[in-house]
Image (cartoon, rainbow, N blue to C red):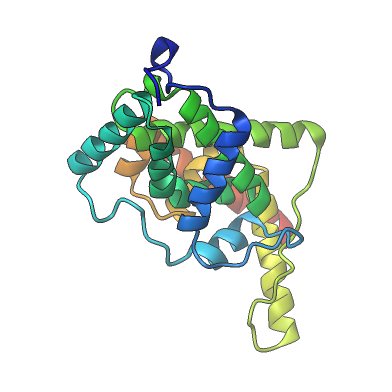
Amino acid sequence: MGPPGPAGRPSGKIGQNDLVTAFAVARRRSVPVVSRDRDSGQGLYSAAESRYASAVKTTATATPVDQLEADQLIISKVLMGHREDFSVLIGRYSDSLYRHALGMTGSPDVAEDILQMSFIKAYQHLAEVRGRFDAWVFRIVANGCKDWLKNIRRTHLSYDEDDQPSGYATPEEDLDRTQLRGDLDHALAALAPSLREAFVMKHVEGRSYEEMADLLGTTVGALKMRVHRAREALQVLLEEKYA
């Protein structure tokens, strides 16, 4: 594979197309068996609820120390020239990162695009990892989601409402549930990105405040305040809708 590249980058020449291909192969191996039709616009709340309500974290079977050592070993191998080993990291973390991107954007396609570009960026800057790779790459994905949300606000685009069947017994109940999901989606879309991020991580992904603080590099107290402010803002928005 050749010697390490300049500035500690993975050795050898590898283009973005190669990275995209490697990402696609790794994702095919790790993605759960669920439907993600390109033409089905699912909202934030409904998409996360229907697709990943019972999903488990990818690192559940390993202790933090074991995982840190395993990741550092893979990173060292990639930097030494074994570029194909980067797919191990993609397979290890892509599911949980996809769930976060989906909860933040409400779009399976956008979530997948953000995830792909984040792993490409992670590969290109792999020598800069200090400490836990999962927390480092999570922040890349989280920033990608926030950038996308800012762009959405600037261009005044709206989210598609969930048009998937809910399984309710009657058309009336089905309509009510679809309407509520749409209202929740639009209320979440109106939140500031930092509040939305905290709310999604806590109430959609089910993370603990300690885990959130570790991933985002902030304090438990700050995150509790963000979640509290997000709940208050959502309550006001929904009360205005149903008053």
- Which residue appears farthest toward the right when viewing the image? 156
* Image position of 78 (left or right of 113): left
Specify whether 213 is left or right of 96. left
Name the foreground residue: 42 vs 69: 69
User: Can residue 221 be seen?
Assistant: no
- The residue most toward the top is 7
Q: How many marks?
A: 0
- Relative to residue 49, is residue 91 drawn left or right? left
Question: Height in image: 206 above or below 214?
Answer: below
Of residues 226 and 152, the one nearer the viewer is: 152
Residue at position x 39%, y 21% in the image: 2
* Quadrant hosting residue 175: bottom right
Give coordinates of residue 50: x percent, y percent: 56, 67
Q: Position of residue 61 (x, y in %)?
A: 24, 56
Q: Quadrant of the N terminus?
A: top left
Residue plotted at (43% across, 34% down): 137
Q: In the rendered view, would you say 40 is above or below 205?
A: below
Horizontal arrangement in the rendering, residue 64 relative to residue 192 (left or right): left
Tell which of 173 and 124 is nearer to you: 124
Q: Which residue lies at the image location 56% right of the left edge and 67% below the top edge?
A: 34
The residue under the point 47% across, 65% down is: 53
Q: Which residue of the protein is positioned furthest toward the bottom in this rendering?
A: 169
Residue 236, how many percent across, how many down? 63, 50
Residue most extreme to the front: 2
User: Is any atom of residue 120 visible in this view?
Assistant: yes
The quadrant the C terminus occupies is bottom right
Residue 81 image point, x, y percent: 38, 26
